[in-house]
Structure formats: structure tokens, C-alpha cells
Image (cartoon, rainbow, N blue to C red):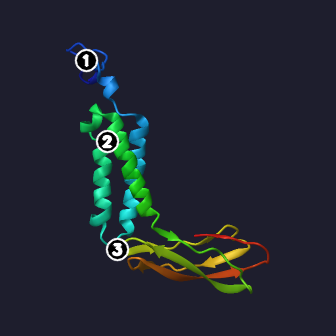
């Protein structure tokens, strides 16, 4: 039994893998690959809130993959320029859906606080607003649990209930 399960010596000679001459110059920079990985993640997050992701998120994803495709390996500066432009476009699109509330004052122990979410995209989005207290022992937050549909090029006002246990300067993250 020991002979049957014992490893046998390889029949073919094995060599250490080598990189062909000139291949190292054509390799993609690690920073470029990492940037595409983060861009793909950001694009998925954007696509998750869009009502028609195929119109905005899909082309951005295609452009990200094109910028890193092996066809670009012969011209890395052009690939980096393409990738930079695509990542800038993605950041611009993501920034078009954001919270624009400035803060305020709670006049009593309990009250509601309006949070404005602005959608500047040309299509509706569906988002979920998560509001948490930075000091939950002093301030409780009761926000909406539902998803919020915001029409294209429109703001949405969401009321969040705050319950203060003490007075003083308190803050929330949204």
C-alpha cells in the first residue's frame, strides 16, 4: 500500500519558468491593473443604483476592460491615457448622485432632520440611505429602511428622525 501511494519521480525534466526576451517591457504596470480593479468595483456600485445600467455602466465597464486588454500592451502610454480618461468619466458619473444636505440644529430632544439626495444623471436611480450617529450613546438615528427612487435630474428629500440623549454638538454620517 505504501508503494502505491508514494509519489513517483517525474518522467519529464522540469525547468524553472522563464520570461521570453522582450516580454517584461510589454507587461502592464501593477498600478494600472489595480486601478482597473478599483474602477470595476466602482462601476458595479454605480450600476447597482441605476434603473438602466446598460446605458451608462456597461459602456464604462467595456472601456475599463479595453484599456487593459492585451491589445494595448504595445502602447502602454496610450492604454494609461485611455484608462485615466475612463476612470475620470466614472468618477464624474458617480459624483452626480450625492447627498447635498449641509447640517442643522435639533431644537428639542427629538426631531426630524431633512437629508437631500441629488440625482444629476439623465436616468432614475434607486438608492438606500444609511444614516448612523458618530456617537450612538448620545444620539440615536431612525432613518428610512426602504429604497429611495429618485427621478432623473431631480433631488429627493428624506426625513430622518433624531433622538438626542444629551445636548451639545453631535453628528451623523449619511
Q: Position of residue 59 (x, y in %)?
A: 28, 58
Q: Name the residue that disc number 2 marks.
A: 68
Q: Residue at x 42, y 42 (%)?
A: 34
In the rendered structure, find residue 8 and report the number of the disc placed on it. 1
Q: Residue at x 43, y 72 (%)?
A: 120
Please say if 43 is above or below 38: below
Q: Earlier in the sequence, mark 1 or mark 2?
A: 1
Q: Earlier in the sequence, mark 3 or mark 1?
A: 1
Indicate the quadrant containing the N terminus: top left, top right, bottom left or bottom right. top left
Q: Residues within 10 Å of mark 1 (few under 14, many from 20)?
A: few
Q: Secondary structure at mark 3?
A: loop
Query: What is the distance, in whole Å, between disc 2 and disc 3 at their CAs?
Result: 28 Å
Q: Position of residue 124 (x, y in %)?
A: 36, 76
Please say if 126 is above or below 68: below
Q: How many marks?
A: 3
Q: Residue at x 35, y 64 (%)?
A: 47
Q: Secondary structure at mark 2?
A: helix
Which quadrant holds residue 173? Answer: bottom right
Q: Name the residue that disc number 3 marks.
A: 123
Front residue of 62 and 171: 62
Query: What is the distance, in whole Å, between disc 3 and disc 1 at their CAs?
Result: 63 Å
Q: Position of residue 54 (x, y in %)?
A: 27, 65
Left or right for 158, reference 8: right
State yes or no: discs 2 and 3 in contact (Cβ < 8 Å).
no
Q: Residues within 10 Å of mark 3 (few under 14, many from 20)?
A: some
Mark 3 or 1: in front is: 3
Q: Residue at x 27, y 24 (%)?
A: 5
Amino acid at each position: 500500500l505504501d508503494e502505491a501511494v508514494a509519489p513517483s519521480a517525474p518522467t519529464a525534466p522540469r525547468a524553472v519558468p522563464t520570461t521570453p526576451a522582450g516580454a517584461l517591457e510589454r507587461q502592464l504596470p501593477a498600478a494600472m491593473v489595480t486601478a482597473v480593479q478599483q474602477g470595476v468595483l466602482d462601476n458595479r456600485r454605480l450600476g447597482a443604483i441605476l434603473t438602466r445600467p446598460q446605458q451608462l455602466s456597461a459602456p464604462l465597464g467595456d472601456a475599463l476592460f479595453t484599456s487593459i486588454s492585451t491589445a494595448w500592451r504595445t502602447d502602454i502610454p496610450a492604454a494609461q491615457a485611455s484608462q485615466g480618461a475612463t476612470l475620470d468619466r466614472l468618477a464624474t458619473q458617480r459624483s452626480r448622485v450625492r447627498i447635498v444636505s449641509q447640517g442643522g440644529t435639533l431644537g428639542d430632544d427629538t426631531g426630524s432632520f431633512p437629508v437631500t439626495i441629488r440625482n444629476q444623471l439623465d436616468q432614475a436611480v434607486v438608492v438606500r440611505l444609511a444614516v448612523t450617529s458618530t456617537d450612538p450613546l448620545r444620539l440615536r438615528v431612525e432613518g428610512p429602511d426602504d429604497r429611495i427612487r429618485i427621478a432623473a435630474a431631480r433631488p429627493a428629500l428624506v426625513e430622518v428622525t433624531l433622538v438626542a440623549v444629551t445636548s451639545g454638538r453631535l453628528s451623523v454620517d449619511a
